[in-house]
Image (cartoon, rainbow, N blue to C red):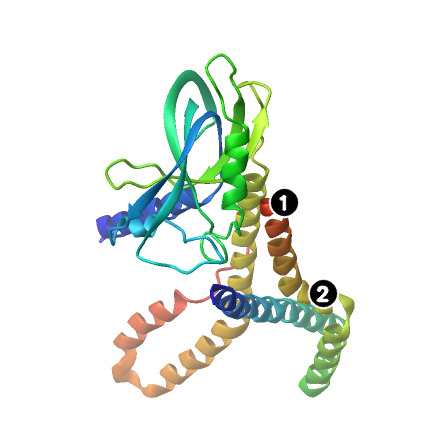
Amino acid sequence: MSLVRLVVFGAIGLTVVYLAVAWFVRSTRRERLEKQWDAANPAGDAEARRAEVEKGVDEYRGGLVYRSLLLIYIVPAVLVVANIVVTNWN
Amino acid sequence: MRYVRITLRTVVIVVVLGLLHYVLPQHDVARVTSTEVIRMDFSSFNRWFFARSDSGTTELTTRDIRLINTERKRTLLLGFIRREAEGVMVYRNEDTGWIWPPYFKFDSSDLQATASANMSAPGVEQWAIITHYGWRNRFFTIYPNAVGIRPVEGPDVRIIPWFNIFFFAFVIFGYFFLRAMWRQFRERKIDPVLDSAGEAYGRVGDHASQTRGRIGRWLDSWRAKPRK
């Protein structure tokens, strides 16, 4: 029963962390794309800028770095298993 | 107002440091002198400082507690300075199972056997490093929980607290990461909203000019400060 509770609350907590970090990396990437676009097209129109930036962010979402954010779930789970083995190994 | 803030801040810091001191692992250099089992009838207060019955069993209001009696080297400053003096220390030996604190300890019986196997006798001193968390308090009848016993050659061993080093490194990393995240959030999500809110206030009219001054200042306090 306490295992179920650990898994449920752990999943909730890690999901909060995952969503926050995912938003953060997307936001910094979007900001950088906007700045790059502004530097390249000083007098460009807003619609083209938005489309270009969104395309860049979508590409980033498909990339390896963004997918590796799943480590936020994997690393704690691995650490827990390692902890169980180390603590209880004879 | 200033004193209230200082007091609140101090209370929060003391509680957090106390919690960390209770939960993080510490290492004692000790000699096991005996082990025993006593029945513990918990009060509603000292129950807080005990973990749980063996992980495969059920929880009742009263149960047996394994204790490890030792003679240990005293220390100063959270164990950083070792002293020659010795004193008694009694550890409890309980499963933490899947509950807090997350030591995932299921092997209390084995640990009790390890303690017995490394028992010290007069003339045959057997030293061991006892990893534990928790506090000993005579008035509340609470004991630190032993999570590991490792026999060593003598009392002069060097102990490197790897877990605590990585833990605090991670806490510092987390602090700066959280701060960067908050700044990004404020710059991208709060500031744009405040800018449009500020424009809306400008349209309300002249009679609101005084209010605008106060609310505007408050709104400004949420704005991102210029980066250095």
Please name which of the two marks, 1 or 2, marks the residue nearer to the observer: 1
Quarter residue A19 falls in: bottom right
Label 2, secondary structure: give it: helix
Question: In screen coordinates, is A71 left or right of B130?
Answer: right
Question: In screen coordinates, is B223 left or right of B61?
Answer: right
Q: What amino acid type is highlighted by mark number 2?
A: Ser
Residue B63 locus on image (x, y percent): 34, 51
Residue A69 locus on image (x, y percent): 67, 66
Quadrant location of the N terminus of chain B in the rendered image? bottom left
* The label number, if any, that marks residue A4 in the structure image: none
Question: Compared with residue B137, is residue B191 higher up or lower down, i.e. above or below?
Answer: below
Question: Compared with residue B217, is residue B118 higher up or lower down, i.e. above or below?
Answer: above
Q: In the depicted view, which residue is nearer to us: B140 or B170? A: B140
Q: Determine which residue is flagged by label 1.
A: A89
Q: In the depicted view, which residue is nearer to us: B83 or B132? A: B132
Q: Determine which residue is flagged by label 2.
A: A68
Subunit under mark 2: A
Q: What amino acid type is highlighted by mark number 1?
A: Trp
Looking at the image, which residue is at 31% across and 51% down? B47
Quarter residue B77 falls in: top left
Looking at the image, which residue is at 51% across and 68% down? A4
The number of numbered badges drawn on the structure is: 2
Q: In the depicted view, which residue is nearer to us: B221 or B29? A: B29
